[in-house]
C-alpha cells in the first residue's frame, strides 16, 4: 500500500485501468450506468490495490462473471498477467439484490420524495454498500489488498456486473 503521505498516483499499488465484461446480456438503466461511470472515474482518481505476492503494479483490472464466479483478471502496466482471482457469487446475492432494491427506491425518491425520506433511504443504501464492500474485502483477503474506499467503488461495479449477468 502507499506509504503515509505518499500521493496515491505515485504508488505502484493502484489501479490504472478498469474494464467490465461488456459481453454480459443485461442493459443497465441510465441510473445504473451513471453509477458505473462514477465508480470507475472515482476508482481511477484514487485507489489502493495490491495483488499479494506481486510487486509489479500499477495494475489493469478486468471484472467479469464466469460460471457463477466474480473474476478479477489482473495485469500489470505492461499488460503481463499478474493474477486471476475468482470469487463465488453466492455470498453476494442477498446484498446485491437488497442494494439494487434500495437503489431503485433512492432513484425514484430523489425525483419526487421529501428530503427526509431521501435521507432515510440514502442511509439504508450506504449501510448496504458498506456491508458489501466489507464482504468484498473479506473475500479478497490474502489475494488482493484494498482499502475501504476502493472496496466501496468495486462493490458498485460488482453490483453492475451482477445485474447484467
Image (spheres, rainbow, N blue to C red):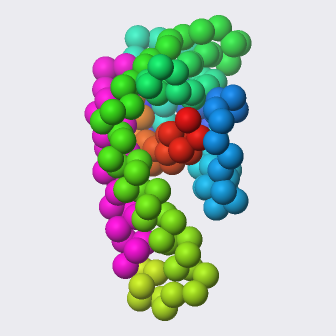
Predominant secondary structure, magenta span: helix
Residue at 61% across, 25% down: 62
Residue at 37% across, 19% down: 143
Q: Nearer the viewer, residue 84 or 103?
A: 103
Q: Nearer the viewer, residue 10 or 85?
A: 85
Image: magenta residue range: 120-144
Residue at 44% across, 24% down: 69
Question: Looking at the picture, does residue 44 appear above or below residue 14?
Answer: below
- Tell me if residue 67 is in the magenta stretch: no
Q: Position of residue 88 (x, y in %)?
A: 36, 26
Question: Looking at the picture, does residue 9 appear above or below residue 115?
Answer: above
| Residue 38 shows in the view | no
Q: Is residue 68 left or right of residue 24?
A: left
Q: Position of residue 81 (x, y in %)?
A: 60, 9
Q: Is residue 157 left or right of residue 50?
A: right
- Tell me if residue 124 is in the magenta stretch: yes
Residue closest to the far top: 80
Residue at 61% across, 82% down: 111
| Residue 40 shows in the view | yes
Question: Looking at the picture, does residue 21 appear above or below residue 121?
Answer: above
Q: In the rendered image, which quarter contains the N terminus?
A: top left
Q: Is residue 25 left or right of residue 100?
A: right
Q: Is residue 3 left or right of residue 25?
A: left
Q: Position of residue 126 (x, y in %)?
A: 39, 63
Query: In which quarter of the view is residue 139 placed?
Result: top left
Q: Position of residue 151 (x, y in %)?
A: 43, 42
Q: Nearer the viewer, residue 5 or 146?
A: 146
Amino acid at each position: 500500500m502507499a506509504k503515509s503521505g505518499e500521493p496515491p498516483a505515485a504508488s505502484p499499488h493502484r489501479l490504472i485501468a478498469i474494464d467490465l465484461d461488456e459481453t454480459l446480456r443485461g442493459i443497465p438503466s441510465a441510473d445504473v450506468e451513471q453509477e458505473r461511470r462514477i465508480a470507475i472515474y472515482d476508482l481511477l482518481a484514487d485507489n489502493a490495490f495490491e495483488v499479494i505476492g506481486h510487486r509489479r503494479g500499477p495494475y489493469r483490472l478486468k471484472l467479469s462473471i464466469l460460471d457463477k464466479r466474480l473474476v478479477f483478471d489482473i495485469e500489470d502496466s505492461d499488460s503481463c498477467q499478474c493474477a486471476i482471482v475468482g470469487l463465488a457469487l453466492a455470498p453476494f446475492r442477498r446484498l446485491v439484490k437488497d442494494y439494487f432494491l434500495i437503489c431503485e427506491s433512492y432513484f425514484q425518491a430523489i425525483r419526487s420524495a421529501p428530503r427526509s425520506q431521501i435521507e432515510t433511504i440514502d442511509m439504508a443504501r450506504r449501510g448496504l454498500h458498506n456491508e458489501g464492500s466489507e464482504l468484498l474485502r473479506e473475500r479478497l483477503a490474502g489475494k488482493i489488498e484494498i482499502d475501504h474506499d476502493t472496496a466501496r467503488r468495486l462493490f458498485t461495479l460488482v453490483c453492475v456486473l451482477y445485474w447484467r449477468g
